[in-house]
Amino acid sequence: MPDTLSFYHALFDYGYCRRQNVPSIGKVFMHNDYKLTSGAVILAALLLAATDSHAQNKLETPDFWLESGQKSLAAAERLRPNEGYAKNVILFVGDGMGISTITAARILEGQAKVGNRGGEENSLSFEQLPYLALSKTYSVNQQTADSAPTMTAIISGVKTNDGELSVGMQVARKEKSAEVINVYQVKTLIEQAEEHGLSTGIVSTARITHATPAVCYAHISERDWESDAQMPADATVKDIASQLIDFPYGNGLEVALGGGRSMFLPNTMPDPEDAGKFGGRKDGQNLTQKWLDHYPHSIYVYDKAGFEAIDPKHTDHLLGLFERSHMEYEYDRASDTAGEPSLTEMTATAIDILAKNKKGYVLMVEAGRIDHAHHAGNAYRALTDTVELSNAVRKALEKTHSKDTLIVVTADHSHTFTIAGYPERGNPIMGLVKHPGSDTFALDQNGLPYTTLGYANGPGYRGPNARPDLAAINTAHPDFLQEASIPLENETHAAEDVAIFASGPKAHLFHGVQEQSYIYQVMANALRFKPGL
Amino acid sequence: MLKNLYLFSILLILGLTACAQCSVKPLQIQSQQPLPALAVEYETVISFDDTDQAQQVYLWRFYRAANRLETHNLHDNSGEIWTRSVYGSISYQRVFHTQQVIIDYLPGDLKAIGAKIDWLALSTLLDSDMIESLRSDTQAEFLGRPATHYKNSDPNKTIEIVWLEQEQLPALIRRTEQGHTIVSRIKTIHALHQSPWALPDSADYSVTDFADLGDKENDAVIRQILPKLKAGHSHAR
């Protein structure tokens, strides 16, 4: 019996049939060869020759390192803790942005810069923040956690169970009773900020009802209960989208920007962007209209044109839902049907609206799709979304002052993403490993080249046969799926610590290896909030 | 005399070549106009040279409209839906009727898993590589409908199809390669509006985004269907 898919290029994928015992027409008509044409090979060779890392690295003499080290030391000695309190807090979360993701994104961005020394020396914007700590991401019940308990720890200071949003560990998963939820809900920094009269905003490239953003404003025992359509019929707790609109603290959220439009529109209402598609709510409610009815000087937008027409001076409550589900990956954003703003643009507009409040604001910004790209085994999109997060942080740094604004950049959890082999300096981070000084690719025990980037598990598994020969494959293609060691339909989260970068008031309190829930403590302390109250 | 013989030979060769070209034609799909909307039931049989292996037989239905394609595998009561928007972007849904679950692949998800979708190939069940390899040999008739028989010339991977000219759909596809043969054959065919089978109603099914599957490790239904899903795939086997 054949054990590969190779023969089946016509109607049925036999391997697929064999696994499923069903026919399928779809898989057959998907191609991702990414084979390098002879022209592309020549162009790649010319590019490599033009970016001769050996020539560039002649700059890196012993004197160079000693001198640059002295500069870094002097900068560290000049560093003075900002003991003051914060007027504003901006929390950036790269969903699934483990340290290897940051490193690879740093190199990818660096290799695109003119005059780079290989790209490895580059720093993303948030890597230049002065204070750093590590965060332990385990949840109450899982060694490797998901976004729900990790973000609950970050924003409320309380670790909880997997899949649960801003409730204590006493609550069972899928608990339906609003009474039980009310007893055990934990207060979030966003809620505290509203109670103190600050403005609040939530920005995400995922659905705004997805776990990470939802943790900020919703208390629920199941992350999937994003609209009433997903709720059990006898549940008394409100769905996540309803909790966003009915947010009972202060004067409500000032800014909510992201995807997830279908969670807010009734299933009888055509989607404004995707012809033939409808909202997802079964209760007939149009929550976007409810937002407009509820808040004075409020706006709801769903596309790039609407977003660009916003006047922050005259907008007090902004709801932007730019996709039925998640927003596009940054790499694909330009081809979106109705157009949508970038994370950087959303961050800038959010700050413009929130900064009108003299008392200050708390803003959470999530790069939500780093995680999705990793789950799909697609490193390119994970890294380009990470670079876009860096752009958003840079914009926030430009629009604020470190004297009164605490900026924290962290991740909720990591992924099984690896940077491996011994590639020479300047080796394309998306490419095949080439050892220093070698004209040929490094080979595995079977004589086959391999990429620098890979995953411990996921859909990139190429077995059970021998590894493919990637020599003629363009592994830098945005749609290339990096190889994985263990076959899983979806690549998984990973349990190692993630980084916390910070600047501004109380940022110096980020030090050492901390529980993830410590992040909340520092942010609350910076705002002079009593933890948990 | 020699000159006449030479001229005769040239004319003979030209004539034979022209004759060959008129009888052996590549398959050309009428892609400029909407393909006929159809409801078709296929039977697919997979048989093996190794007689110890049992033959596998599947029944499945194919519904084709201008911007929507749906399959329904009767064997396990699952299917696929492909939808083309007015802007040309293509979405894909994997449908599990028994579990009443839809996995929704948005255009961005398909890109992220390296899926480049060819709508014409989905609509005709023939991909472009296959079409290029086929040449007609005889006219045929299938279920009383005019058809053309095509085959390729690769002895290691033989492909033959019977192409319904008016319906623009293969009535039969036979592939033989590496010790096995797959034959898909139309059992019945109808205009879509005269379909005897109701399209599976999936309006009330639970919908999960493909992008969210990575966070569904504790969902029993998702765990059950996950092995059947279209995730990423390799490119250099």
Image (cartoon, coloured by chain):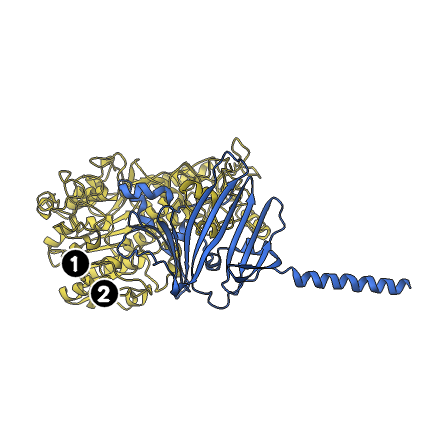
| Residue under pointer 2 | A300
| Residue under pointer 1 | A245
The picture quadrant where one finds residue A485 is top left
- Distance from Cα at disc 2 to Cα at disc 1: 12 Å
Rendered hue of chain B is blue
Q: How far across and how far down the image is residue B107, in percent?
A: 38, 56
Viewed as shown, does residue A38 lie left or right of B90?
right
Q: Do marks 2 and 1 share a subunit?
A: yes
Q: Which mark is residue A167?
A: none
For marks 2 and 1 on the same chain, the one whose residue lies earlier in the sequence:
1
Q: How far across and how far down the image is residue B90, in percent?
A: 40, 59
Q: Amino acid at mark 1?
A: Ile
- The correct choice, above or below, for B34 with respect to B174 in the image is below
Residue at image location 16% in from the left, 40% down from the top: A172
Question: Which residue occupies the extreme right position in the image?
Answer: B1
Decide which of B15, A331 is in the foreground and name it.
B15
Q: How far across and how far down the image is residue A298, in percent?
A: 18, 66
The chain under label 2 reads: A
Q: Which element is circle 1 on? A: helix
Viewed as shown, does residue A347 lie left or right of B18?
left
Viewed as shown, does residue B166 lie left or right of A164?
right
* Residue B111 seen by the camera: no
Q: How far across and how far down the image is residue B119, in percent?
A: 46, 59
Q: Are marks 2 and 1 in contact (CB under 8 Å)?
A: no
Residue at image location 23% in from the left, 65% down from the top: A300
Q: Amino acid at mark 2?
A: Tyr
Question: Which residue occupies the extreme front position in the image?
Answer: B144
Q: Who's yellow, chain-wise?
A: A
